[in-house]
Image: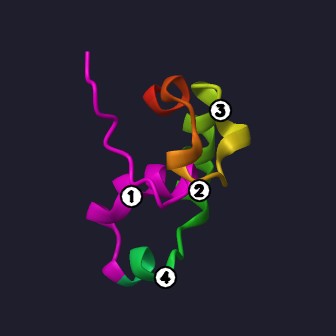
Amino acid sequence: IFQQFNLVGRLSLFSNVMLGALGRLPSWRGLFGVWPGADKDKAMAALHRVGVSEYAGQRANTLSGGQQQR
């Protein structure tokens, strides 16, 4: 069981999920937060699947430990 959740505390939960797409997107998209619509939809679906979609805009460091773990 991991004790650290590897989230960037200053970023929103949505942005943390979108960081996973940086390896296959041009760097300017990540720099300016210009994400393709299909990737946004996938990220929101993933957040919904684990029950935290209502916190998508909230900073990761404000979530409870259980919410961060999801």
At horizontal 57% and vertical 53% (from top left) the residue drawn is: 59
Frontmost residue, 42 versus 1? 1
User: Could you tell me the amino acid type at mark 3?
Assistant: His
Residue at image mark 3: 48
Q: How is the image coloured?
A: rainbow
**1 and 4 marks in contact (CB < 8 Å):** no
Q: Reply above or below: 65 against 62.
A: above
Pair 2/4: label in front: 4
Please tell me the numbered disc located at residue 39: none
Frontmost residue, 53 versus 59? 59
Q: Reply above or below: 25 against 54.
A: below
Q: CA distance from mark 1 to mark 3?
A: 17 Å
Q: CA distance from mark 2 to mark 1?
A: 11 Å
At horizontal 57% and vertical 38% (from top left) the residue drawn is: 63
Rendered image quadrant of residue 51: top right
| Range shown magenta | 1-27
User: Could you tell me the amino acid type at mark 2?
Assistant: Lys
Residue at image mark 1: 19
**Where in the figure is residue 22, as x and y percent of width and height?**
33, 64
Residue at image mark 4: 32
Residue at image mark 2: 40
Question: Relative to 18, is 2 on the left or the right?
Answer: left
Question: Relative to 38, is 54 on the left or the right?
Answer: right
User: Could you tell me the amino acid type at mark 1?
Assistant: Leu
User: Label 1's element?
Assistant: helix
At horizontal 58% and vertical 45% (from top left) the residue drawn is: 62
Q: CA distance from mark 2 to mark 3?
A: 12 Å
